């Protein structure tokens, strides 16, 4: 299946949240995602960005890697590694982030492999929006 | 090899005890124990607060968002099927988020956004409603664009700007919960949000005249004298929290009056 790959790197600072949201929305709208699905992607991208900003150093770049096919978008974002067992605030933040990602994505995972710690999100076209109502 | 969701596992020992949650649901549903329902609301309020804070950069006071989110939480508690093998948080999060999204979609405009985008955003919302009804599903961005005779980019732009719904919260300590520092201020620059709204001084003065003398005084000190909330508190011999509350209430009354006129 043909796929397109797009990379967006922005400084790890809050004011770039809008850039991230708009880029993500623009990309998935090309795939025929619905209004609600696009809105979910905007939330997911922002949540991932916030998590990255919280866990990476201030001078870091946050690089979003989008892979688009006819059926889905896969978003990979490097995040900082955290010792959740010793930091209650970080633990809480991570837990809450997962609730949002769980509700707006079809799949998400915090993974750690040779490329480092990262967050991987998948949203499928036509899988319905994240809201149950 | 991916380590599946290590952070998520941590949530088990956070605030919510799964077994106790089920016990509360059992007491509420089977025994009609209202206090169990209240306890569930209290137990999951932190989740509401977090989700509400995620919408903070859209310009509404977080306290208001928490209230809206709590409505979503209560709906989730009342609708949750205890026989389903789903965790309550998994069910509640989209319901709360849905309530918050709906709240924003239903909001009017307060800060100055170019008229073209205001109108377009309004039309996009209308188009989404109309098309959802017609298609029996959420429309795509292209469908919305076609319906309105605009490009997809314009629809996306309208989606983004439609978040500049309202006054920036006057709580200056916006990083008080330490989770991040997002604020609509970062997007709209340093223009005074109130002044941006008020293009018509006559409308403003009519609205201001309906406020109490103390409310007018606080408004004057904040926006004409440019004092901080703490400075106003010292001058009026009240607490900073009271100033904050007073300002928020005053601005809400003003906004309602201005919108009405």
Image: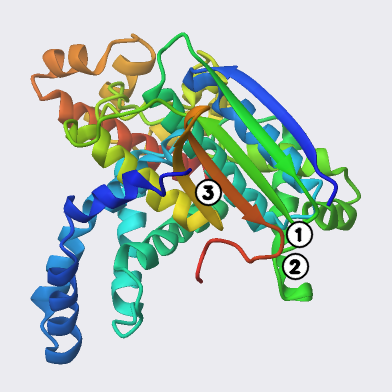
For residue A126, say whether it is visible. yes
Q: Residue at x 33, y 23 (%)?
A: B219
Of pointers 3 and 1, the one earlier in the residue sequence: 1
Of pointers 3 and 2, the one earlier in the residue sequence: 2
Residue A102 x/y as whole percent: 45, 55
Chain ID for label 2? B
Q: Do the residues labelled 1 and 2 touch (CB within 8 Å)?
A: yes
Q: In which quarter of the image is residue B63?
A: top left
Per the image, the residue denoted by label 1 is: B127
Per the image, the residue denoted by label 2 is: B130
Residue depth check, mark 3 versus mark 2: number of the one nearer the observer? 2
Residue B154 x/y as whole percent: 80, 39
Q: Residue at x 56, y 58 (%)?
A: A106
Badge 3 and badge 1 in a common chain: yes
Q: In which quarter of the image is residue B244?
A: top left
Given residues B63 and B3, the one toward you in this image is B3
- Crowdedness near tag 3: few (<14), some (14–19) or many (≥20) residues, C-alpha within 10 Å: few
For residue B261, say whether it is visible. no
Element class at badge 1: helix
Chain ID for label 3? B
Residue B5 x/y as whole percent: 39, 48
Per the image, the residue denoted by label 3 is: B260
Using residue B2 as the reference point, say whether residue A39 is left or right of it: right
Given residues B204 and B55, the one toward you in this image is B55
């Amino acid at each position: 299946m043909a796929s397109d790959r797009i990379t967006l790197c922005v400084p790890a600072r809050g004011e770039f949240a809008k850039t991230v949201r708009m880029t993500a929305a623009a990309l998935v709208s090309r795939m025929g995602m619905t209004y609600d699905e696009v809105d979910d992607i905007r939330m997911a991208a922002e949540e991932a960005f916030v998590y990255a900003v919280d866990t990476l150093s201030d001078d870091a770049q946050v690089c979003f890697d989008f892979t688009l096919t006819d059926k889905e978008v896969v978003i990979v974002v490097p995040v900082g590694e955290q010792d959740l067992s010793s930091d209650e605030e970080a633990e809480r933040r991570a837990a809450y982030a997962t609730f949002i990602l769980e509700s707006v994505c079809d799949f998400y995972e915090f993974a750690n492999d040779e490329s480092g710690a990262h967050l991987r999100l998948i949203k499928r076209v036509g899988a319905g929006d994240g809201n149950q109502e | 090899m991916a380590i599946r969701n290590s952070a998520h596992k941590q949530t088990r020992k956070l605030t919510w005890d799964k077994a106790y949650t089920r016990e509360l649901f059992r007491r509420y549903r089977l025994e009609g124990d209202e206090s169990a329902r209240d306890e569930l609301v209290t137990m999951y309020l932190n989740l509401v607060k977090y989700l509400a804070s995620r919408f903070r950069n859209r310009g509404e006071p977080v306290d208001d968002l928490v209230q809206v989110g709590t409505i979503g939480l209560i709906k989730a508690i009342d609708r949750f099927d205890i026989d389903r093998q789903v965790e309550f948080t998994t069910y509640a999060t989209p319901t709360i988020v849905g309530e918050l999204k709906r709240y924003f979609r239903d909001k009017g405009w307060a800060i100055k956004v170019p008229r073209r985008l205001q109108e377009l955003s309004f039309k996009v919302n209308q188009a989404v409603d109309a098309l959802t009804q017609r298609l029996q599903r959420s429309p795509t961005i292209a469908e919305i664009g076609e319906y309105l005779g605009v490009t997809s980019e314009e629809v996306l732009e309208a989606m983004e700007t439609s978040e500049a719904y309202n006054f920036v919260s006057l709580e200056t300590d916006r990083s008080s919960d330490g989770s991040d520092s997002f604020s609509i201020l970062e997007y709209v620059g340093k223009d005074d949000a109130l002044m941006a709204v008020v293009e018509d001084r006559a409308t403003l003065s009519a609205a201001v005249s309906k406020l109490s003398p103390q409310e007018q005084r606080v408004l004057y000190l904040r926006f004409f004298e440019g004092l901080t909330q703490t400075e106003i508190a010292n001058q009026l011999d009240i607490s900073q929290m009271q100033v904050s509350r007073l300002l928020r209430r005053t601005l809400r009354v003003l906004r309602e009056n201005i919108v009405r006129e």
